[in-house]
Amino acid sequence: MPAGTNYGTAQLSRTQPDFGNEIFDGISTNNSVVWMLRQSGNIKITEGGRTFTHPLQYALNTSFAARAHDGTIPTPDPQTHTHSEWTPGVISGSITLFKLHQAMNQGKSVIIKYLEEKKDSAITSMTEVLGDELVDGSGTAPSFDSLETIISTTNTTTVGGIAGSDASWQNYAATQATAFNTTNAGITSMDAMIRGCTFRNNSPTAIFTTSVLYGGYYISQAGNIRYYNEELADAGFEHLNFGRRPVLWDDNIDTGRMYAVNTKTTWLQVLKMGNLVTTEFQPSVNQLSDSALMYLFAQLTTGSRRTNGVTSFTGGTGGV
């Protein structure tokens, strides 16, 4: 921390600040994955339940077919839908206000400034943890499921309680042994990834990768027309498009990884009573301070694993 007077801790309000009790308020504006889920209408608030569920269609109704006008139409009761199941994850933290600083605090303008600093610090801290978890969470409690677990490089793994032994519940996964720019390997792999996880009108809506691979994609487009998404640009997210899909980078993505994500079939599910809640400030029983807790009960889920994909770039010389 830089040396100097800590003005922040000397400025305190005697009233509880308004931190906002919705994930939409602050987190989604600082996290590209959450922001795109929100734009797709896929931040889902649920009333309760032991687990989150996500419906998915795994079979077709076989009664539909081309037949003679007087042909007999079968009337089965096909089981075409099931659901994946996900355990809620918890992110939590605390906000502490010391009695001495409350006593030292004077001046309305200073109070407002301090409350904004407290709010920004809490939301930013929550954002950083959520961003880490949604991209790089291990899927083992207390860690969240994430792009890394849902879109696995070992696509036969069990995800959402469903075994990956069936091809309909496997994401696309490929390894590219050369560098991104070598003989157009990067662009070729991106194209193969998109085609490999596109089924009818369901396909990835965004590509997330590392800063290094994003740089490789940028260089590969030199001299070409580069398109971008105006909404993403207005929200402050640096990106380029690959076809109609924005390409963004995230520092939490493992080296050499590139994820194709279907944000329409990927949800961030949030329990209503754990939607970025901040408790009332309570006095400590053994310290001259007041503390409040902030928490989020949520999980990343999907109902269409096969419309997501990952490519891993493992080596090569030259390029990225």
Image (cartoon, grey):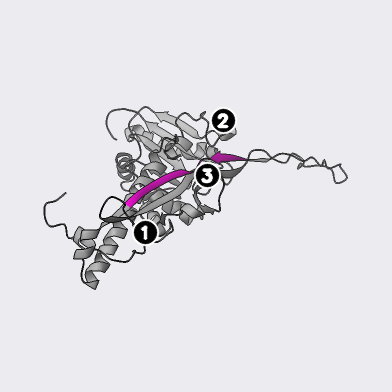
Within 10 Å of the Cα at label 2, are there few (<14), some (14-19), or many (20+) other Cα atoms? some
Q: Position of residue 32 (x, y in %)?
A: 39, 51
Q: Which mark is residue 163?
A: 2
Kindly identify the residue that appears in the image at 31 percent across and 46 percent down: 222
- Under circle 3, the secondary element is loop
Task: Assign the C terminus to one quadrant of the image.
Answer: top left
Q: Earlier in the sequence, mark 2 or mark 1?
A: 2
Q: Nearer the viewer, residue 207 or 25?
A: 25
Within 10 Å of the Cα at label 1, are there few (<14), some (14-19), or many (20+) other Cα atoms? few
Q: Position of residue 291 (x, y in %)?
A: 32, 55
Kindly identify the amino acid type of the residue bearing the numbered disc 3: Ser
Q: Nearer the viewer, residue 281 or 171?
A: 281
Kindly identify the amino acid type of the residue bearing the numbered disc 1: Ala
Question: Nearer the observer, disc 2 or disc 3?
Answer: 2
Is residue 202 in view from this perspective? Answer: yes
Answer with left or right where residue 69 lies relative to residue 193: right
Q: Earlier in the sequence, mark 1 or mark 3?
A: 3
Q: Earlier in the sequence, mark 2 or mark 3?
A: 2
Magenta run includes residue 313: no
Q: CA distance from mark 2 to mark 1?
A: 37 Å
Question: Nearer the observer, disc 1 or disc 3?
Answer: 1
Report the label total: 3
Q: Position of residue 161 (x, y in %)?
A: 56, 34
- For label 3, the residue is 203
Q: Nearer the viewer, residue 20 or 302?
A: 20
Q: CA distance from mark 1 to mark 3?
A: 24 Å
Q: Position of residue 109 (x, y in %)?
A: 23, 71
Image quadrant in which you'd find residue 211:
top left
Kindly identify the residue that appears in the image at 16 percent across and 57 percent down: 6
- For label 1, the residue is 235
- Under circle 1, the secondary element is loop
